[in-house]
């Protein structure tokens, strides 16, 4: 079965098709050298700010909303790689679009991290390259 991403849209965002989410995640995993033919399942949940706030508090001990969270489950070649949780409403405040946040979350699932400062990190450079290759940013 070819790699695909399921999208659960709890906020009626209606701007992220499963096919597009699949393209974005595949580009992120490929940029990290993973074999897309062997990648497990990924889901993207589009949720309201209070939901992502609660998840951020529960799992990161941060009492505030955030733009994206990634939850790894079985690893890239496991049955279920993990879930990317995006708050589209937060994306409006952050200038990052939902597609950019999906790529960011997929890179976290692929093992990348950026610490407290994102700008200037290897992850920022890879993310920008993926966004350009996927047509989210101009080349």
Image (cartoon, grey):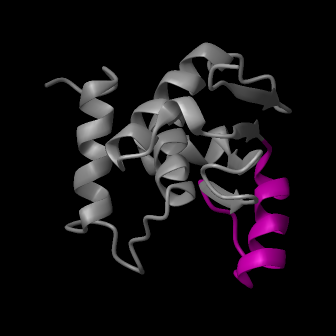
In the displayed structure, does residue 55 sit left or right of residue 112? right
Is 70 placed above or below 25 here?
A: below
From what the image shows, is residue 78 above or below residue 138? below
Q: Would you say 86 lies left or right of 12 here? A: left
Please name whichever residue, 93 or 75, is drawn nearer the observer in this view of the structure. Answer: 75
- Image spot of residue 99 (x, y percent): 49, 32
| Residue 96 in view (yes/no) | no
Instruction: Report whether 3 appears left or right of 130.
Output: right
Q: Image point 49% across, 22% down: which residue?
A: 23
Image: magenta residue range: 47-67
Residue 48 magenta-highlighted: yes
- The percent position of residue 137, horizontal first and vertical second, equals 26, 28
Residue sitting at x 71%, y 16% = 14
In this picture, is 80 found above or below 60?
Answer: above
Is residue 31 visible in the rendered image? The answer is yes
**In front here: 125 or 86?**
125
Is-magenta flag for residue 51? Answer: yes
């Amino acid at each position: 079965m070819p790699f695909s991403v399921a999208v659960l849209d709890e906020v009626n965002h209606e701007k992220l098709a499963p096919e597009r989410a699949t393209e974005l995640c595949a580009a992120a995993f490929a940029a990290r050298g993973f074999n897309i033919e062997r990648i497990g399942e990924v889901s993207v949940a589009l949720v309201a700010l209070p939901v992502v706030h609660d998840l951020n508090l529960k799992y990161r001990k941060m009492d505030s909303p955030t733009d994206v969270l990634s939850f790894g489950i079985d690893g890239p070649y496991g049955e279920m790689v993990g879930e990317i949780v995006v708050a589209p409403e937060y994306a409006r405040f952050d200038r990052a679009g939902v597609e950019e946040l999906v790529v960011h979350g997929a890179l976290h699932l692929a093992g990348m991290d950026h610490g407290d400062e994102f700008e200037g990190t290897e992850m920022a450079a890879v993310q920008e390259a993926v966004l350009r290759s996927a047509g989210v940013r101009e080349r």
